[in-house]
Image (cartoon, coloured by chain):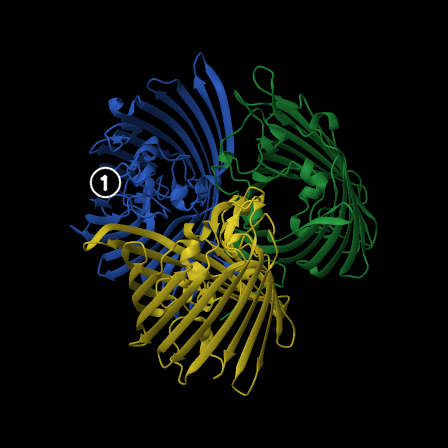
Chain colours: A yellow, B green, C blue
Amino acid sequence: QKTNTQKFGKGLFNLIGKDSTWSMKIGLRFQTLATSNWEIHHGLSNPASSMMIRRSRLKFDGFAYSPKLKYKVELGLSNRDLSGASKYTGNAPRYILDAVLKWNFSGNFVVWFGQTKLPGNRERVISSANLQQVDRSLLNSRFTIDRDMGVQLRHHFKLTNRFLVKEVFSISQGEGRNITTGNIGGHQYTTRIELFPFGDFANKGDYKGSDLKFEPSPKLSLGFVYDFNNNASKTRSNQGSYMTNDTGFYVTNIATLFIDAMYKHNGFSLMAEFANRTAGDAFAKNADGSLTGDVVQVGNGLNLQTGYLLSKTLEISGRYTNISLDKVITGKGAENQYTLGLSKYISGHQLKVQTDLSYTDIGFKTNQLLYRLQVDIHF
Amino acid sequence: QKTNTQKFGKGLFNLIGKDSTWSMKIGLRFQTLATSNWEIHHGLSNPASSMMIRRSRLKFDGFAYSPKLKYKVELGLSNRDLSGASKYTGNAPRYILDAVLKWNFSGNFVVWFGQTKLPGNRERVISSANLQQVDRSLLNSRFTIDRDMGVQLRHHFKLTNRFLVKEVFSISQGEGRNITTGNIGGHQYTTRIELFPFGDFANKGDYKGSDLKFEPSPKLSLGFVYDFNNNASKTRSNQGSYMTNDTGFYVTNIATLFIDAMYKHNGFSLMAEFANRTAGDAFAKNADGSLTGDVVQVGNGLNLQTGYLLSKTLEISGRYTNISLDKVITGKGAENQYTLGLSKYISGHQLKVQTDLSYTDIGFKTNQLLYRLQVDIHF
Amino acid sequence: QKTNTQKFGKGLFNLIGKDSTWSMKIGLRFQTLATSNWEIHHGLSNPASSMMIRRSRLKFDGFAYSPKLKYKVELGLSNRDLSGASKYTGNAPRYILDAVLKWNFSGNFVVWFGQTKLPGNRERVISSANLQQVDRSLLNSRFTIDRDMGVQLRHHFKLTNRFLVKEVFSISQGEGRNITTGNIGGHQYTTRIELFPFGDFANKGDYKGSDLKFEPSPKLSLGFVYDFNNNASKTRSNQGSYMTNDTGFYVTNIATLFIDAMYKHNGFSLMAEFANRTAGDAFAKNADGSLTGDVVQVGNGLNLQTGYLLSKTLEISGRYTNISLDKVITGKGAENQYTLGLSKYISGHQLKVQTDLSYTDIGFKTNQLLYRLQVDIHF
């Protein structure tokens, strides 16, 4: 006896409760990643390699009780997904990625409550299931504000017949995900505005890598984010490590700015992001003013990424990333990374093989070459 | 293609195997909690706040092979659920809450084998999904014997046409849940007797907070528990922390007594619990008789909780808890906590918003005020 | 409303995607284990006992996109399953056991990519769900190469009409499962050849304990494994602990050999395994040649196990295991273990009660007696 269900890549189940009182889509995926890297010094030297299950996720989403109340729960299964246990997470793995309720209480207004991604940089909000290259850029690893616990108010409206505007305002704890020790310092306030001068993308393409839908007319989305973390105590706003000192925690105001864009047309796609982080006083101090050694990672980042579909399933892509942390404060030189990628979308983002080659020019350090191969499968 | 399933709140799936050889209900839930607390000292001072996914669970239960063999598996997903990793748990998170087989081998006799809640205090055995207020009382946190690995023998009979009696006898390891390092000292023996002079409650209401069924006639359940943990080595019987000493573990006999009651009628509910813990010698010692600093948490607890449904979905509730640990032994002053709660049961316990305000008067310490808001959703 | 599904023990779900684009079987199981052991010294002394959920697993397998692309994901839920967290696993529990894709790219050739069991000793590859006794032998705990990340190439062909040959060649990282810190030293190369002179077993019986299918004619499988771990850095090839030294890691070539056999006929079964491990230089050293104290566990193991079904559901089994690590290198005396087992297969391996008694004669140590009782249930 077999249960018939939907096509490959559309979820394990698409449940509809009796009397349409609820729905649930259940998804499962895993990524198998192999990497090789070298230092570039008299040719290639110091080779290193790694193979791992990079990500594996179990996902539940749908509506509950009323179509106006949606929810999402996403769980991480791989060791990289689960890592980050500390005394701030109950010494337990960070198993829950998302657990959030979304209530459409009136018109175009939706309020979110729970743990989920903040309305930060576009590259982060694009699911790791839908990336154009093997993984996100260095800009994201250095500047993202990722996930947090809190409340988001979301709204959208049409400026003209085509011109769409989306706004999000969020208040969160400002400590990152899965924290059990409560709020330190003040809260985190995030505002994101998105402009769609040519209207919405097909199939939510503004938050998916690659123009697999071959947009017949040009589509553009521009995003502007201002994030203020009041009395933050981590080196990268709500990310990075806690800045402990002799009295507990060093806190300072940290502001993060993102400007990003997505453009798609007929198999061509371009994603651009600029990031900037500043801090009230970036040097963590003890009560007597002596330095603890921790420093807020202030500076700028730029990421430009473009892809072109040679056929319906084969894409080449290129990426340039520049990270310029404040040299005086962080002691780190600028990084420039150049990546060339090739993706075979056997069944869209649901079954794909992706490979890329990255050259990284790092100030004050040896340059590096990185080769990656990844297979993705999403049920 | 959609799979039709049951109404909201009745499980993701209610599977029935071919030829009725097995069944399984699969449930998922999560609680999003926000708290604020203050010290009461010249008004409100030292404010602190926290937001977290408090609990999230995945649950499987039904019968297997024969309707006489039931089982339950419950997994914890949130960081608070998973916390408690130590060398005694294989340095792994405590993922499994329940994994138990229940065999109805004869008449009204059922034997349980595995890890699950002991037949201890009523407030603990009430699922965290079915609480009347945001969370359990201080009595439970100080005195509960929670879960353990072992065997339970359960039986029930009718004394008269209406008067129902349930008995449970349990032998368990006495170390709490998810222990991989085996038994230390002797085993734990628990006996619980329950009396239902007016017959059984509707919809298992004796183990659910709030009288959502509006019992048309008064219902009462009285419970009596005697728990003996032979040569126990944890500060709260099978809970708390291990009392290590220079030769390994300090062990002493620990006895815990509970008397509890649940009364419901027409939207009104009252739950009362009394707890008492004693130990052979509460002071943990090294081989030479010197003190290690650990102390068995002996003393008394009292919890009185009542609720009244203003409508079918709105309830006010009040709670008074007194914790009187032995001052001489534990060095702790008495605590009195007063809680006022409000619950909106949008869809019973399956979708609810609960909030409460607690004032705690703590001996030798600053008094505290605690505000909590929680949203629960159970599929 | 109920979802009808298959009979007990055949999986929670057997999904078939629309247009047969994918399939998935979902399984769940748990084992409840109670053990008692004693030292044998003037009768039985130093008794110890333990009860735990020994294993609990969630399993997903089937094909995806095309019947030629199969996959398997297996997750561990119990604390023993999850244990082994270290800085090499991102300080996260080892939740994923298997996550592997299997592509039948041509004829009888299948390539595997991901994390799964290596083609090592037969006893390991037999699922812990399908064991003849309560648990695997000491040979397996000392010599198995268990799971790793990598690529396997599998092939089979018929030598004659009946004589079947299966070959596997594997290249893996050589660090064991769930490692996030990449490859240390070289890779691991494993070759396994299997001969089936009388053809294949019924119901994959060559990798299941007990002849529950009562093979009408004799069936035999012989296996030969040669495993070479180039510049390995763990005490048991890709298992055991890392051999750290003053410059990072001590590495040496480690070779492991297995010869094993399975014979079944009419309710009788015999499994035999021989293991041998050698190392280039078994003594871990610092850069200056001084010993670190770590030693590669070199030596031999022999396991002989036989079972006979007294009825369709009741089996007696016996096992003899000899472990002879190199005394000079490891400082460990030989171990001989004798085990007598009894299994009641209430519903095959899906619902069974198993018990065994083991006497262990350990060189240079006190002999031991071990009693175990286990209940297994697999949905």
Q: Is residue B144 left or right of residue C155?
A: right
Q: Is residue A189 left or right of residue B359?
A: left
- Give the amino acid type for the residue marked by disc 1 in the picture: Asn
Q: C344 or B247, which is in the foreground? A: B247
Q: Residue at x 67, y 43 (%)?
A: B125
Q: Residue at x 52, y 52 (%)?
A: A234
Residue reaching furthest bottom?
Answer: A161
Q: Is residue B272 visible?
A: no
> Residue under circle 1?
C231
> Residue A348: percent from the left, percent from the top?
37, 70
Q: Looking at the picture, does residue C340 appear above or below residue C228?
A: above
| Residue A16 occupies quadrant | bottom right
| Residue A364 occupies quadrant | bottom left
> Residue C59: percent from the left, percent from the top?
43, 51
Q: Is residue A5 left or right of residue A111?
A: left
Q: Secondary structure at mark 1?
A: strand
